[in-house]
């Protein structure tokens, strides 16, 4: 490995080595070697069942890997669950959203990290609703998310509004890595534009991002690289910023019409 490549590896925020997940006899993910550098935005693409969401679930601790290793921010990690990943600095928007339907917008934004007052009473504390609502309004303004009333419960919102709340929650807290799993799949044109503006803001702030998406236009507009999964394996690493890559090329890798080079050689 050249000196340049050794230098570049100091910029890595996330690396997986041989990451594998089996469900009994089903090999959903096999030997996934992946690198994400600080400030980089990378798309993960592939057909349904290709291993994209399985890969994300291993990184975020939703599931425990069969074998392999995950190195995050310079340390090998073993997340017991999503809370561990979030505490380490990984914010994730899952397809299932993970929102509490009976709570309002502020309660959902601060779920698990509530602001409190009267901390001098030891274990007896009171939630600081005023501060959380103020910060919620600031977060929605920052991300461009429009909600009629932050006092509305999630169960009374449209699917698009729920998705925007989940994304605003992720983007509101400083993180070392943001992961979005199909964040605009159920959104209209206006709401999709809001999410894409959030992604651009994260890029401007230098926060790395992994985006799982089927939206080719979105990926080419917003991302630096595309990682293609096929049948549980990474089959292509495409530098769309510096190489002449088209949507037809990506589709060819997804369908197997093209076979990718050895991933790690091109990644580092």
Image (cartoon, grey):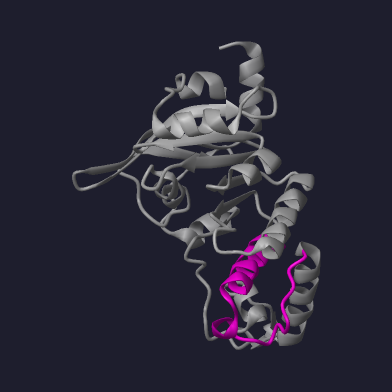
**Identity of the residue drawn at 57% across and 54% down:** 180
Residue 210 pos. (x, y %): 58, 45
Confirm whether residue 6 shows in the render: yes
* Quadrant in which the N terminus is drawn: top right
Residue 200 pos. (x, y %): 75, 49
How many discs appear? Answer: 0
Of residue 248 and residue 30, the one placed in the foreground of this image is 248
Q: Is residue 151 magenta?
A: yes
Q: Is residue 123 magenta?
A: no
Task: Give the quadrant of residue 235.
Answer: top left
Residue 162 pos. (x, y %): 59, 73
* 134 relative to 19 in the view: left or right: right
**Identity of the residue drawn at 57% across and 59% down:** 87
Image: magenta residue range: 144-172
Confirm whether residue 17 shows in the render: no
Residue 103 pos. (x, y %): 57, 84
Of residue 110 and residue 199, the one placed in the foreground of this image is 199
**Identity of the residue drawn at 53% across and 55% down:** 182
Residue 150 higher or lower than 72, as above or below? below
Residue 141 higher or lower than 117, as above or below? above
């Amino acid at each position: 490995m050249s000196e340049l490549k050794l230098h570049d590896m100091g910029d890595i925020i996330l690396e997986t080595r041989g990451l594998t997940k089996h469900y009994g006899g089903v090999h959903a993910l096999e030997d996934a070697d992946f690198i994400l550098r600080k400030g980089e935005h990378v798309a993960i693409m592939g057909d349904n069942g290709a291993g994209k969401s399985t890969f994300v679930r291993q990184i975020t601790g939703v599931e425990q890997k069969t074998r392999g290793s995950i190195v995050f921010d310079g340390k090998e990690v073993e997340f017991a669950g999503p809370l561990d990943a979030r505490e380490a600095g990984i914010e994730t928007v899952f397809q299932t959203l993970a929102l509490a339907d009976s709570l309002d917008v502020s309660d959902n934004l601060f779920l698990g990290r509530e602001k409190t007052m009267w901390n001098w009473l030891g274990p007896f504390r009171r939630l600081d609703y005023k501060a959380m609502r103020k910060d919620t309004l600031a977060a929605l303004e920052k991300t461009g998310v429009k909600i009629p009333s932050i006092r509305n419960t999630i169960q009374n919102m449209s699917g698009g509004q729920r998705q925007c709340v989940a994304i605003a929650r992720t983007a509101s807290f400083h993180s070392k890595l943001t992961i979005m799993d199909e964040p605009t799949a159920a959104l209209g044109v206006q709401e999709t534009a809001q999410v894409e503006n959030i992604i651009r803001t994260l890029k401007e702030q230098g926060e790395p991002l992994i985006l799982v998406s089927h939206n080719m236009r979105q990926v080419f507009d917003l991302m630096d690289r595309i990682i293609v999964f096929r049948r549980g394996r990474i089959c292509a690493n495409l530098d769309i910023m510096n190489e002449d890559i088209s949507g037809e090329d990506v589709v060819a890798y997804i369908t197997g019409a093209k076979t990718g080079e050895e991933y790690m050689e091109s990644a580092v």
